[in-house]
């Protein structure tokens, strides 16, 4: 009796679990970006730029986590950044990112492949010019590979 109950409970969980995952939708695509007065860098230290935009998968919930990366031995260590990401008609802000609040993030769902978004610091900081054009390109699943 107990065995049968245990078995049917297990079977029910196995049956419901994929359904719950489907209902929860696609999982969030997280990207970690380092910001300094020199620009935006990926986790390997490579700078994003015209030849190296951030590529995001189409129709996917994404969270971009921006991390304060200023070297404390430089003037720029005193920087306060606030990154805005313009997505379609919406602007998402990270809030202030500085030495005592190291990270801030924005979350949104990407549009179709071919969409172009832009990130920029909205505060007057050292290195402003390097932080005005963070390019984001939305690509199809095949292009993402
Ligand atoms: Cu800034």
Image (cartoon, helix red, strand yellow):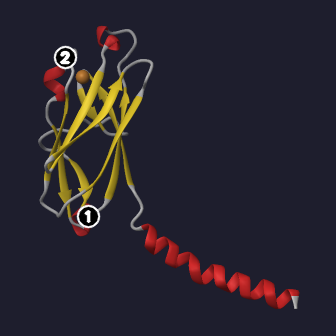
Which element type, helix, strand or loop, lies under badge 2?
A: loop
Residue at 50 percent across and 78 percent down: it is 19
Q: How many marks?
A: 2
Specify the quadrant that holds the C terminus. bottom left
Q: In the rendered image, which residue does mark 2 sit on?
A: 124
Mark 1 close to ligand 1, CB under 8 Å: no
Residue drawn where x is 59% and y is 84% of the image: 15
The x and y percentages for residue 81 are: 28, 23
Return the mark for residue 111: none
The residue carrying pointer 2 sits among few (fewer than 14), some (14 to 19) or many (20 or more) residues within 10 Å by Cα, namely few
Name the quadrant where ligand 1 sits: top left
Badge 1: few (under 14), some or many (20 or more) residues near its Cα, within 10 Å?
Answer: some
Relative to the observer, which residue lies in front, 5 or 133? 5
Above or below, 57 relative to 92? below
Q: Nearer the viewer, residue 17 or 125?
A: 17
Find residue 17 and report its horizontal and vertical position in percent: 57, 76
Distance from mark 2 CB to nearest ligand 1 atom below 8 Å: yes
- Residue at point 13% right, 48% down? 89
Residue 135: x, y in percent? 16, 43
Identify whether 73 is placed above or below 58. above
Q: Nearer the viewer, residue 59 or 69?
A: 59
Image quadrant containing the N terminus: bottom right
Residue 53 in the image, given as x and y percentages of width and height:
18, 46
Toward the right, the furthest residue is 1
Residue at 41% x, 18% y is: 99
Label pair 1/2, CB-CB below 8 angstroms: no
Rendering quarter of residue 130? top left
Q: Report how far apart the C-alphas of labels 1 and 2 lie in the structure.
A: 33 Å
According to the picture, the residue beneath numbered tag 1 turns out to be 59
Q: Earlier in the sequence, mark 1 or mark 2?
A: 1
């Amino acid at each position: 009796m107990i065995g049968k109950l245990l078995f049917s409970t297990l079977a029910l969980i196995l049956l419901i679990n994929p359904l719950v995952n489907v209902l929860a939708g696609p999982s969030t695509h997280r990207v970690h970006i380092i910001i300094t007065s020199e620009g935006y860098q990926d986790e390997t230290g490579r700078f994003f730029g015209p030849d190296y935009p951030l590529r995001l998968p189409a129709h996917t919930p994404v969270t971009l986590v921006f991390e304060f990366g200023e070297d404390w031995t430089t003037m720029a260590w005193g920087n306060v950044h606030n990154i805005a990401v313009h997505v379609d008609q919406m602007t998402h802000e990270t809030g202030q990112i500085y030495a005592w609040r190291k990270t801030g993030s924005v979350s949104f769902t990407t549009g179709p492949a071919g969409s172009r978004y832009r990130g920029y610091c909205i505060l007057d900081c050292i290195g402003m010019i390097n932080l005005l054009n963070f390019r984001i390109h939305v690509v199809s699943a095949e292009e993402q590979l």
